[in-house]
Amino acid sequence: MKLENDKKFLQSSPKRIYYVWNYLEWGGAQIYLLGLMNKMKEFCEVRALMPTGSNLQILKFLDNLQVPYEFFGAPTDANPAPTLKRKLERHWNKLRCEFSLLRYLTKFDLSDSIIHTELMPWQSLTAVAWLCRRAKVFVTLQNSILPIPKHRRLLWQLKCAVAARFENFYIFASNEDAKESLRELFPDKFFKRIKVTYTNVNPTEINKALQIEISREEICGKFNLPADKFLVFCVGQFIDRKGRWIFLEAAEKVLKSDDDTAFVWISNSNLSREDERKIENYSLGENFFLINGENVGSEHIDLFKLLRVADVFTLPSYVEGLPIALLEAMALGIPSISTNVYAIPEAVKHHETGCLIEAGDSEALKDAILELKNDASLRRKLSKNGREFVLANFSEPVVADIAAAEYFASFRTN
């Protein structure tokens, strides 16, 4: 039965939902939240809250969904902290950012409301407790928790045990691997209530993009890409954990034996001068293109139209949840290569729905790219199987219904 027709849910529903994040970078987490916003605006008031200075592209996506948004203050500091001084500065910034957010939220009537955020109890127990006293609080864990020292794990377990006692506290995990990483932190009863709301794709948007007649030459011309070459794409922040240097190392190795290939990375990241110098050291010349995501277009479908000229998609990450860029590429029918880490194998089955390599192995990435370039039948197989698997298992409407049902159920238990 469709959720819209299920009266037992609709009789008790939130009046408003605030989707909140406290950092400037945006990516799969926001695309996931946009899908939930798109669903829930049918039933209640929906609003996005984010730091001042947020990326114009995510604001355009919100405008297109007709979801209002507001800015609450300075973002959290996500830069590396190699020294004690930097660690203290970053912690102080985190506290200021949380205080700014909580103070901003006092302007709203939070009764009969939901706050959906990423503030986890081991990071922000005080903030979570404050919010739970005023609203229903849902948090989504996007990525599996990395290994931590035993003493820190004990502290996290204590904080999670406290949070599990909050009547208004709920957790979603965006993949099975992320959920499993919570098993040792939360009491068993709470752990069993954690729902998996997968990172997902919008099948309507994907199909619409595939139905648009495109010209490879025209699109490549717009972004100065060589239409006559085999194009290997990646989408994501141009950062170390996404495997940026492995991507460039593999590109360098491919081009030593095959100069008929070009490599494209689409990113919203700002390059440092050091990044620019390091890119130049790979001597890729006119065979590497770094495209700023803001120049792709104001709608998500503009990215899909650009991706359709890709012959292969790759994401050589070291650390990931279940990346939306990978799922979208597979749903578009682009043969895809990614790494055997965390939740990626939940979508990529080697030589069935995609190609899996080990993280940090540029030689394996080079081999996978050349294998796909030289084997058209394998490309066709992965294109078909990858698309079908993603649309069957990681669909936005299904995930949004699961989340909506949990939102409504949280009010029904009052």
Image: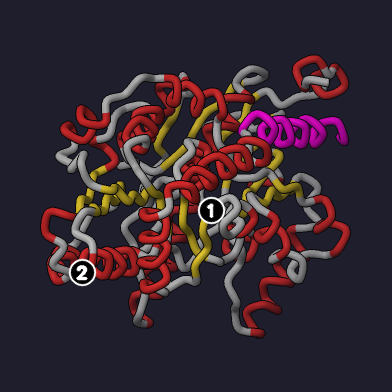
Identified by mark 2, the residue type is: Lys
Horizontally, residue 383 falls left or right of residue 167, namely left
Q: Nearer the viewer, mark 2 or mark 1?
A: 2
Query: Is 104 located above or below residue 22 in the figure?
Result: above
- 149 sits to left or right of 161: left
Q: Name the residue under label 1.
A: 354
| Magenta-colored segment: predominant secondary structure | helix
Q: Residues within 10 Å of mark 2 (few under 14, many from 20)?
A: few
Q: Quadrant of the N terminus?
A: top right
Residue 259: numbered disc: none
Residue under label 2, please give it: 256
Q: Earlier in the sequence, mark 2 or mark 1?
A: 2
Q: Residue at x 59, y 78 (%)?
A: 148
Per the image, label 1 sits on a secondary structure element best described as loop
Q: Nearer the viewer, residue 60 or 315?
A: 315
Across and down, in percent, residue 60 comes to 35, 27
- Residue 219 located within the stretch drawn in magenta: no
Q: Quadrant of residue 51?
A: top left
Looking at the picture, how far across and down is residue 220, in whole percent? 21, 35
Which portion, as a residue range, is magenta? 396-414
| Residue visible at 81% across and 47% down in the picture | 167
Using the rendered image of the protein, determine whether residue 101 is visible from the camera's viewpoint.
Answer: no
User: Magenta stretch containing residue 412, yes or no?
Assistant: yes
